[in-house]
Image (cartoon, rainbow, N blue to C red):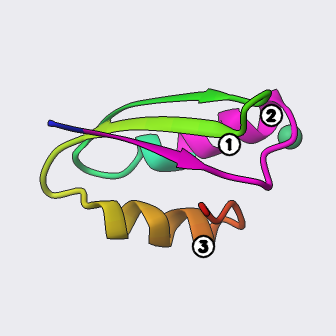
């Protein structure tokens, strides 16, 4: 299991966090997604077949690119 925290500048409120949670949560291998609109940080726990690159690509695709 890998834990990675992403900073996502486009997050502005709890709805954004919920949207990111929904999208990432659907990816095979993603175990948990936690986010905080105040810090714009999203922490993802994942394992194979999910990869950091795949998660980053998904974030870009849904218009919440990580820095
Ligand atoms: Cu929002």
Mark 1 secondary-structure assignment: helix
Q: Where residue 36 sits: x, y (%)? A: 68, 26
| Residue in view at x 79 percent, y 27 percent | 38
Q: Which residue bears the numbered disc 1?
A: 19
Mark 3 → mark 2, Cα distance in angstroms? 17 Å
Q: Residues within 10 Å of mark 3 (few under 14, many from 20)?
A: few
Q: Which residue bears the numbered disc 3?
A: 61
* CB at disc 1 and ligand 1 closer than 8 Å: yes
Mark 2 secondary-structure assignment: helix
| Residue in view at x 22 percent, y 46 percent | 29
Q: Residues within 10 Å of mark 1 (few under 14, many from 20)?
A: some
Quadrant (top left, top right, bottom left, bottom right) of the C terminus: bottom right
Q: Is the residue under label 2 in contact with that under label 1 (CB below 8 Å)?
A: yes
Q: Where residue 4 sits: x, y (%)? A: 36, 43
Q: Is residue 19 on the magenta stretch?
A: yes
Of residues 33 and 4, which is closer to you in this image?
A: 4
Mark 1 → mark 3, Cα distance in angstroms? 12 Å
If you read the primary sequence from the N terminus, does the residue marked by circle 3 or circle 2 appear first?
A: 2
Q: Is the residue under label 2 in contact with that under label 3 (CB below 8 Å)?
A: no
* CB at disc 2 and ligand 1 closer than 8 Å: yes
If you read the primary sequence from the N terminus, does the residue marked by circle 1 or circle 3 appear first?
A: 1
Q: Is residue 3 left or right of residue 58?
A: left
Mark 3 secondary-structure assignment: helix
Q: Which residue bears the numbered disc 2?
A: 15
Q: Where residue 11 sits: x, y (%)? A: 78, 45
| Residue in view at x 12 percent, y 52 percent | 48
Q: Quadrant of ligand 1?
A: top right
Q: Which residues are magenta?
A: 3-22
Quadrant (top left, top right, bottom left, bottom right) of the N terminus: top left
Q: Where residue 39 sits: x, y (%)? A: 72, 32
Of residues 55 and 27, which is closer to you in this image?
A: 55
């Amino acid at each position: 299991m890998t834990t990675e925290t992403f900073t996502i500048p486009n997050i502005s409120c709890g709805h954004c966090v919920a949207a990111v949670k929904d999208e990432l949560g659907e990816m095979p291998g993603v175990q948990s997604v936690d986010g905080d609109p105040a810090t714009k940080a999203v922490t993802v726990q994942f394992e194979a077949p999910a990869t950091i690159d795949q998660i980053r690509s998904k974030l870009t695709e849904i218009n919440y690119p990580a820095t």
